[in-house]
Image (cartoon, rainbow, N blue to C red):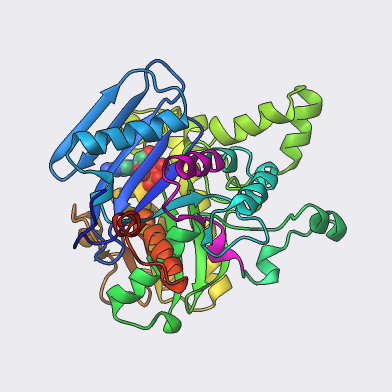
Amino acid sequence: MTTAGAAPRTVLVLNSGSSSVKFQLVEPDSGVSVASGIVERIGEDTSSAKLKIGDQDLHRAGAIADHEAALRTVFELFEEAGAHLDSLGLVAVGHRVVHGGRALFRPTRVDDALIARLTELAPLAPLHNPPAVLGIEVACRILPDIPQIAVFDTAFFHDLPAASATYAIDRDIADQWQIRRYGFHGTSHRYISEQAAQFLGVPLENLNQIVLHLGNGASASAIVGGRPVDTSMGLTPMEGLVMGTRSGDVDPGIVFYLARAAHMSVEDIESMLNRRSGVLGLGGEIDFRELHRQITDGSEQARLAYDVYIHRLRKYIGAYLAVLGSTDVITFTAGVGENDAAVRRDALTGLAPLGIELDEHLNDSPARGARLISADKSPITVLVIPTNEELAIARACSEALDDAGEERAWGERGAAK
Ligand code: ADP
C-alpha cells in the first residue's frame, strides 16, 4: 500500500437508499468535491453505476445484486479512473442517517452498539433508516480500517424548544413511543443558515432567519441566532410543506377514514401519503419544470398542484414570520428553491406589508451560486443559496475526527501498520 503523501484529506459521503447509493468524495478543508456518483436500481437487472471524477465520466450498466456489490462497483470505477483508493487521502466515510431518534444527534463513530441502536430506531423511519444501516454495514466490511461516522438529519433540530417539538397528544403515549417533532434536512438548514450569515457578513448570532429547503422533499425552518426554533417536518419527514410525492400536513382523520371506509391497510395509506401524494399525486408530475410546461399547456390538475404547493408554502412563511417576530433573512435552497424563480416569486408576492419585496430582475436572473434576490428597500433580505449537504456531512466527520485526534489519512494509517 502506498502512502497518502501530500493528498488533501477526503471524506467519502454515502447516502444509502433502498435501491440506490449516492456518493461524493469531498475535501472537507477546501470544500472541493473530488468525485461523485450514484448506483441506481440495485437488485434489478438494469442497475447502473456512475462516477464523475475530474473530467472523466464512467458508467457501468448491468445487474448489481445488492448494496455490497454496489459499493464494490464504485471502487472498481475509481480504480478504472486511475484513482486508487489508498491515494485518495480518505480519512472517513460519512453516512447520512435520516433519523437519530431522541438520543443520537452528534456525529457518531460507527460501532456495533450504534448499529444496534439504529436498528432499534427502524420503526421511527422505516423507509430511511434500514437502508442507511445496510450502507453502514457494507462500508464497514469493505473499508474496515477507515473510521465510519453517522451524521443525522435530525441533529440540528435536537434542541427545538419544547413548545414547537411537542405534539398535543397524550403525554404518556408520546413519552413511551418517543413521539415528538424531530425535523429533518437538518444538515441543509444548518449549512444554509451559516452560509447566509457569511454571505451577509453578519454574525450568525445576530440573525433571525427562515430557511426554505425545497427539493423533492421540502421543509422550512425558523432560526434565531443559529438555533432552530421551529421546523415543518415532524416525527417523520411527511409533515409540513407539500413535496414532490409526499402530502405534507393532512388531517390525521384521513388515515382513519381510509382505513375504515376504504379498507386500506396502514401500509397502503403510508405508501399513498409518501409516494403518490404531493405535487405528483395532484398534478401527475414530480419535476417542477414539467409541471410548469403542463400549466402552460392548460392542464388544470397541474395548475391545482402548483397552487396547493404555493398556498402551503406561504402559510409556513407567514407562520414563521410570526414565530420569529422579526425576520432578517429568508433563504431558498435545494432543487426547486435554487432554480424555480416562479415558485420564489409566487411564494413571496404581495408580502410588502410584511417586509418582503423581491427584485424581479434579480429573482429571474439565471445566475447560480449564493445571491441576493430582494430589492434594496426590502426590510427582509431574500437570498438563494445552493445547499451542499455532502460538504456539511464531510465537515462534520472531519471535525469529529479532529476532536478524537484522528487525522491521518487511510494511506498513512495503512503504511503505519
Ligand atoms: P432531492 O430532495 O431529491 O435532493 P433536489 O433538491 O435535487 O431533490 O430537487 C429536485 C427537484 O428540483 C426536481 O424534482 C425538480 O422539481 C426541481 N428542479 C431541478 N431543477 C429545476 C429547474 N431548473 N427548474 C425548476 N425546478 C427544478
**Where's residue 316, x and y in %?**
53, 59
**Viewport quadrant of the C terminus:** bottom left
Q: Measured along the vertical axis of the image, is residue 287 above or below residue 322?
A: above
**Where's residue 236, x and y in %?**
62, 48
Q: In this view, does 253 lie to the left or right of 111?
A: right
Q: Which of 297 and 76 is in front in this view?
A: 76
Q: Does the magenta stretch include residue 157?
A: yes
Q: Which of 166 and 312 is in front in this view?
A: 166
Q: Which residue shows up at 40% across the image and 15% down it?
A: 45
**Where's residue 49, x and y in %?**
31, 29
**Which residue extends farthest top?**
45
**Which residue extends farthest left?**
55
Q: Is residue 254 left or right of residue 337?
A: right
Q: Which of 354 and 44 is in front in this view?
A: 44
Is residue 243 visible to the viewer in this orientation of the structure? no
Q: Is residue 116 left or right of residue 79?
A: right
Is residue 194 visible to the viewer in this orientation of the structure? yes
Q: Does the magenta stretch include residue 123?
A: no
Q: Which residue shows up at 74% across the image and 26% down it?
A: 265
Q: Ligand 1 falls in which quarter? A: top left
Q: Is residue 187 left or right of residue 297?
A: right
Q: Which residue shows up at 28% across the image and 45% down it?
A: 85
What span is in magenta?
132-158
Location of residue 257 by image quarter: top right
Q: Measured along the vertical axis of the image, is residue 208 above or below residue 80?
A: below
**Where's residue 304, x and y in %?**
47, 36
Q: Which of 343 and 72 is in front in this view?
A: 72
Location of residue 160 by image quarter: bottom right
Q: Which residue shows up at 43% across the image and 84% down it?
A: 206
